[in-house]
Image (cartoon, helix red, strand yellow):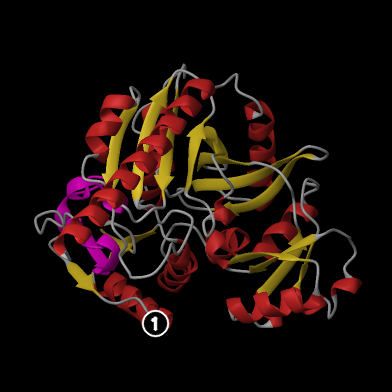
């Protein structure tokens, strides 16, 4: 039977080089993809002899295309990794009677109110207080008090569809307008102060067979004001890893996922301890998969593809001992000093990879993983990683300043 892959990512990330993440020979693969954003980056016609390209701007049309491809190719499985496509794939599976994550399984990972309601019903209590936008007309009616609020699209994508606001009706109204929300499509919740962490798990037959815990370098919601973001893995003895794994297991059990890869975020609050943020039933982005693979040997993207394609998640057991950390520093600057990579390799002993990615569209940073430079570093400890992080930021700032000064001198000479 054919496996249909619906791809909205860089193709090599989603399918692997030559499509090797998908079980079965190339003749049993069908690819539905876009061209934008690397959707055909590294495309090899021998790996995907059957390709349908579409713009993916119209969800209803895309769903019809996927259903047509799955029907005409006698598909046995449908694979989708992007947040936007999870429910679409589940609906097509249901219509065609195919195995894989169902709409009922997927919805609690897509709708933020359903997500939290399900956890409350399961007895999980480490939640921010929340309400649908349709449940109140003034902030004075909210059953909690504070200085800031958070407005989210119920089925929004990451930090790009979240707004942190002062406690005022006008601020809420402005956020609702900015996010183009109807009262039925939005959520309001209390603001939780503190650093953020995430757990990335592989779930097979209802059991967590692998989990990695990490901390964000800065909260993803700060992408509009920060000069960098990123994440770094936690070693087994690094706090608060043990507590994170307990909360992660409770959330997965409460949301009821049977098979899939999860990315679940938490706040670390001084008074309340760990507080749930959000959960997704797909691999984390922004280099999380690379950091996890370098420390544990587990490829989260490949595991997600294999599970949806009806295969076992892991080809080999994870590393039994993790004695290093690995982190990604995502620089958000549009300045690209030509000597940056060589200088980083000279100054940062733990650097394992560097990539520069100019903006795909004009304008500023669009979301929390819209990195212009991706620097991946391996270190023996959190302290060593932080030292190399400071060196990385300093090198970029120094070289960018030197570049600007040289440009200014050149312009001065040319105009004289």
In this view, the residue in front, 195 or 413, is 413
Residue 106 horizontal/vertical position (percent): 55, 60
Q: Left or right: 2 with respect to 113?
A: left
Q: Hey, which quadrant is residue 59 in on the image?
A: bottom left
| Number of numbered callouts drawn | 1
From the top left corner, tell me how far across and down residue 200 is, in percent.
Answer: 52, 40
Identify the residue under disc 1.
58
Is 32 within the magenta? yes
Q: Which of 339 and 75 is in front in this view?
A: 339
Residue sticking out furthest to the front: 416
Q: Position of residue 12 (x, y in %)?
A: 24, 51
Residue 160 position in % (x across, y down): 53, 64
Q: Does dot 1 land on a helix, a strand or a loop?
A: loop
Crowding at label 1, few (<14), some or many (≥20) Cα neighbours within 10 Å?
A: few
Residue 54 vertical position relative to residue 232 in the rendered view, above or below: below
Q: Is residue 79 left or right of residue 189?
A: left
Answer above or below: position of 112 versus 239: below
Residue in the image at 33% along x and 70% along y: 362
Q: Which residue is drawn at 50% across and 28% down?
A: 386
Q: Residue at x 39, y 26 (%)?
A: 378
* Residue 392 occupies quadrant: top left
Q: Is residue 401 above or below residue 82?
A: above
Residue 260 horizontal side relative to residue 310, left or right: right
For the N terminus, the quadrant is: bottom left
* Magenta stretch: includes residue 78: no
Q: Is residue 302 visible?
A: no
User: In this view of the protein, which residue sits in the foreground, 317 or 226?
Assistant: 226
State whether residue 346 appears in this view. yes
Which residue is located at x 60 percent, y 18 percent?
A: 237
What is the magenta range? 14-40
């Amino acid at each position: 039977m054919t496996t249909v892959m619906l791809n909205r990512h860089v193709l090599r990330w989603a399918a692997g080089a030559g499509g090797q993440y998908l079980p079965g020979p190339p003749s049993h693969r069908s690819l539905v993809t876009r061209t934008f954003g690397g959707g055909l980056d590294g495309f090899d016609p021998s790996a995907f002899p059957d390709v349908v390209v579409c713009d993916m701007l119209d969800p209803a049309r895309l769903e019809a295309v996927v259903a047509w491809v799955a029907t005409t190719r006698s598909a046995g499985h449908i694979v989708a990794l992007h947040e936007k496509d999870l429910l679409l794939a589940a609906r097509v599976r249901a219509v065609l009677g195919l195995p894989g994550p169902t709409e009922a399984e997927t919805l609690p990972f897509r709708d933020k109110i359903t997500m939290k309601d399900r956890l409350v019903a399961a007895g999980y209590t480490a939640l921010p207080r929340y309400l649908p936008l349709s449940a109140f007309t003034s902030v004075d009616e909210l059953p909690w008090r504070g200085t800031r609020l958070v407005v989210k699209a119920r089925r929004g994508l990451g930090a790009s569809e979240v707004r942190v606001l002062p406690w005022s009706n006008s601020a809420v109204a402005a956020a609702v307008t900015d996010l183009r929300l109807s009262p039925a499509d939005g959520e309001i919740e209390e603001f939780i102060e503190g650093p953020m962490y995430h757990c990335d798990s592989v779930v097979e037959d209802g059991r967590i067979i692998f989990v990695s815990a990490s901390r964000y370098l800065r909260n993803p919601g700060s992408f509009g004001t920060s000069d960098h973001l990123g994440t770094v893995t936690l070693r087994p003895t690094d706090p608060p890893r043990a507590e994170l794994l307990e909360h992660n297991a409770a959330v997965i059990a409460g949301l009821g996922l049977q098979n899939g890869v999860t990315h679940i975020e938490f706040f670390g609050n001084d008074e309340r301890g760990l507080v749930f943020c959000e959960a997704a039933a797909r691999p984390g982005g922004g280099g999380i998969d690379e950091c996890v693979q370098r420390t544990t040997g587990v490829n989260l993207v490949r595991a997600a593809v294999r599970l949806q394609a009806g295969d076992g998640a892991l080809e080999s057991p994870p590393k039994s001992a993790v004695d290093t950390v690995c982190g990604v520093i995502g620089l958000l600057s549009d300045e690209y000093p030509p000597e940056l990579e060589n200088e980083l390799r000279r100054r940062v002993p733990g650097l394992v990879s560097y990539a520069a990615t100019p903006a795909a569209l004009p304008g500023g940073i669009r979301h929390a993983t819209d990195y212009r430079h991706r620097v991946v570093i391996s270190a023996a400890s959190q302290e060593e990683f932080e030292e190399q992080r400071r060196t990385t930021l300093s090198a970029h700032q120094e070289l960018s300043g030197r570049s600007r000064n040289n440009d200014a001198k050149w312009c001065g000479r040319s105009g004289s």
